[in-house]
Image (cartoon, rainbow, N blue to C red):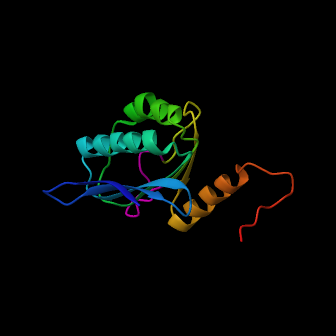
Amino acid sequence: MLLNLNIDPEDHSSCAISYNEHEYWLQAIWKGYVDPAEAMHGAQAYLQQAANKRCAYLLNDNSRLQGPWFDSLDWLLDVWAPEAARLGLRYVAHIVQADTHRDIFSGRNFDKVPFEVQVFQERADAIEWLQWMRDSNLPRTSGMVAVSQ
């Protein structure tokens, strides 16, 4: 379900934030050349949606980005990350840009980030990890399975 779509009218770069009802996670898909103002706007839009959904999982897909992206890692770590964690974020699967196989998160130390971040080159690998994290954190029942008829 699409929750927010920001499209730059000049170059058609975008950030689409949606909720995957089947997987129970938020996802942000970035496309094109995203300048710093667009990146901050998209990151803030995620926080607005997270406030409504209270979702522990985020699939952040940068695979369709082009060119340099968002040089303010300090803002992400010092402002955005603590707020996202306060809103319930616990696990982020981050997919790097396809044209460089690296971006601002590659090679970074995430010791100060208040949630777990894994960096991937392939979307399928990111999805598999996020599914595993979600499934391993589901509340357990006492061996009983509810079946609806």
Task: State left or right for residue 116 relative to residue 3.
Answer: right
Q: Is residue 103 magenta?
A: yes
Image position, residue 109 (x, y; %)? 55, 37
Q: Can you give x and y, in whole percent of width and height, for residue 120 in the image?
A: 53, 57
Report if residue 93 lies within the magenta region.
no
Q: Position of residue 126 (x, y in %)?
A: 56, 60
Q: Residue at x 58, y 41 (%)?
A: 90
Kindly tell me whether residue 122 is visible in this rendering: no
Q: x and y percent of residue 15 in the render?
A: 32, 54
Of 28 and 100, nearer the camera is 28
Judge by depth and name the residue closer to the eye, 92 or 71. 92
Q: Residue furthest front?
A: 149
Q: Residue drawn at (65%, 53%), measured in percent from left and top?
A: 134
Magenta: main secondary structure equals loop
Quarter of the figure that contains the N terminus? bottom left
Looking at the image, residue 87 sits to the left or right of residue 76; the answer is: right
Considering every residue shown, the one lying at the far left of the view is 10
Q: Which residues are magenta?
A: 95-105
User: Total label count?
Assistant: 0
Q: Residue at x 86, y 51 (%)?
A: 142
Judged left or right of residue 16, residue 94 is right
Which residue lies at the image location 27% right of the left edge and 51% below the top edge? 34
